[in-house]
Image (cartoon, grey):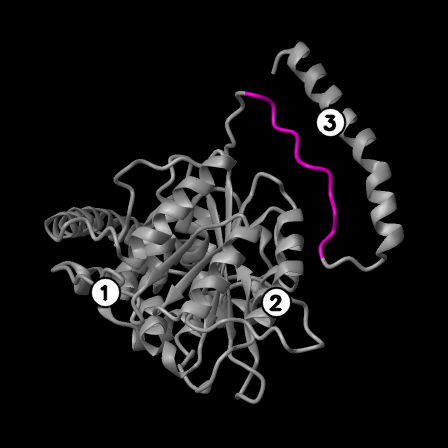
């Protein structure tokens, strides 16, 4: 970087700190335990491309009895949404979270899945969501939104595209005296750069008015879909083979770390096994396509993946304590350990090349099917994608017109 540009960068950063420090002091004095830490906005010089953009998305999902069709659609489409977000020109880092809500008197009011780049573990919990309870309206929409905005660990980076999709078919309870109401929640979301989009299932007029107001206050989009969600659900001739390849790729992973790290890694492996056992071939193929993209690498590998760490040269095998290595190779001589890692890396390379070819064939097939069906412009997929593309653009995240994934 040229000296003059460096000097301008330092000046800009200093000016921001001087400007915002008194505001931060005042905010902390008036509210010693704010729900979200206030930080100065990031300084981005004009014309400088964001090399590693970030996307954080939380789905707030009504899981009462009338929502069974849309919950099933969510289970099938989460990976397509992730792949579509991953198709940005500058490969963003992607985190997802979930808030399931019902109402007081039901089995639960809310269940939360934290924002994480470990989409496998998130999906494993989504698979357990069932439509039940309810039977009356309104629902605890306010609590669901409150959890999404105030209980998720959102990035403090002002360049991160932070978005909530509220999905449900009943309006918010506004008569509970001890919960935060959505106008106040929307104000907090706006202060922290979180956009709130609303997706109404069905055509209840009171919900329409409610959802439109929430989207307006949340600087987001409102759209309505059929009660079942009318998501694009097209199988391809490549799904089964991609699903099987994905399982084989998962088997090339070896993890290292201390006891606490191995507990987390075991949980991730268990989540993937659950997915392969219970999810449809189509959903597994969608996951495989996401994992094959640069943005999906963190979900595929997780933390402490030995084969990638060694083959990339980031870590030297001799620097890892033997007890921290995978149990399957701890008793081997170093030469055999190195051979196992090398074989796993070679196997992974072959499988990834096969997956790339299949993913391209699958993508081309589905695009043709969607085009022949008229573009599916009223589908749940198209409406979510249109919001993502237009809103992410404000954060320097660009998409091609044909980047939708199904």
- Does 295 sit above or below residue 48? below
Instruction: State the image coordinates of residue 265 (x, y, percent, origin top left).
Output: 51, 67
Using residue 14 as the reference point, say whether residue 193 is left or right of it: left
- Does 229 sit above or below residue 26? below
Instruction: State the image coordinates of residue 255 (x, y, percent, origin top left).
Output: 48, 62
Magenta portion: prevailing SS class: loop
Q: CA distance from mark 3 to mark 1?
A: 48 Å
- 342 falls in the magenta region: no
Q: Earlier in the sequence, mark 1 or mark 2?
A: 2
What segment carries the magenta color? 36-46
Residue corresponding to mark 3:
13
| Foreground: disc 1 or disc 2 | 2
Residue corresponding to mark 1:
282
- Residue at image location 61% in from the left, 63% down from the top: 182
Residue corresponding to mark 2:
147
Q: Are marks 3 and 1 in contact (CB under 8 Å)?
A: no
Q: Is residue 84 visible?
A: yes
Nearest the viewer among 8 and 389 is 389
- Residue at image location 66% in from the left, 30% down from the top: 43
Q: Is residue 57 visible?
A: no
Q: CA distance from mark 1 to mark 2?
A: 31 Å
- 40 falls in the magenta region: yes
Q: Earlier in the sequence, mark 2 or mark 3?
A: 3
Q: CA distance from mark 2 to mark 3?
A: 33 Å
* Helix, strand or loop status at disc 2: helix
Using residue 61 as the reference point, say whether residue 158 is left or right of it: right
* Helix, strand or loop status at disc 3: helix
For the C terminus, the quadrant is: bottom left
């Amino acid at each position: 970087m040229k000296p003059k540009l460096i000097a301008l960068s330092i000046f800009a950063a200093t000016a921001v700190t001087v400007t915002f420090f008194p505001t931060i002091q005042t905010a902390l004095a008036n509210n010693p335990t704010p729900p979200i830490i206030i930080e100065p906005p990031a300084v981005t010089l004009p014309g400088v491309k964001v090399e590693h953009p970030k996307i954080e998305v939380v789905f707030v999902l009504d899981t009462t009895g009338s929502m069974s069709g849309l919950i099933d659609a969510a289970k099938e489409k989460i990976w397509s949404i992730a792949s579509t977000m991953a198709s940005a020109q500058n490969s963003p880092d992607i985190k997802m979270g979930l808030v399931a809500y019902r109402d007081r008197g039901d089995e639960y009011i809310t269940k939360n899945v934290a924002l994480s780049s470990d989409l496998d573990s998130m999906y494993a919990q989504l698979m357990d969501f069932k439509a039940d309870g309810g039977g009356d309206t309104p629902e605890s929409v306010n609590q669901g939104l409150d959890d999404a905005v105030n209980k998720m660990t959102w990035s403090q980076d002002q360049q991160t595209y932070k978005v909530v999709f509220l999905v449900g078919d009943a309006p918010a309870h506004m008569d509970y005296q001890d919960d935060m109401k959505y106008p106040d929640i929307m104000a907090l979301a706006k202060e922290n750069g979180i956009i709130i989009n609303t997706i109404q299932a069905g055509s209840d007029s009171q919900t329409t008015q409610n959802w439109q107001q929430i989207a307006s206050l949340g600087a987001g989009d409102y759209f309505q879909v059929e009660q079942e969600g009318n998501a694009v659900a097209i199988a391809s001739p490549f799904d089964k083979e991609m699903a099987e390849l994905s399982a084989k790729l998962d088997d090339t992973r070896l993890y290292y770390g201390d006891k606490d790290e191995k507990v987390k890694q075991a949980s991730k492996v268990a989540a993937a096994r659950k997915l392969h056992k219970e999810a449809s071939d189509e959903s597994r193929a969608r996951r495989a396509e996401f994992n094959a993209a640069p943005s999906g690498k963190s979900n595929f590998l997780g933390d402490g993946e030995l084969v990638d760490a060694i083959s990339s040269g980031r870590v030297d095998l001799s620097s890892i304590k033997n007890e921290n290595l995978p149990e399957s190779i701890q008793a081997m001589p170093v030469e055999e350990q190195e051979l196992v890692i090398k074989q796993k890396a070679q196997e992974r390379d072959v499988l990834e090349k096969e997956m790339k070819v299949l993913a391209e064939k699958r993508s081309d097939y589905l695009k043709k099917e969607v085009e022949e069906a008229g573009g599916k412009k009223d589908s749940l997929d198209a409406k979510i994608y249109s919001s993502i593309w237009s809103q992410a653009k404000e954060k320097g995240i660009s998409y091609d017109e044909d980047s939708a994934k199904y």
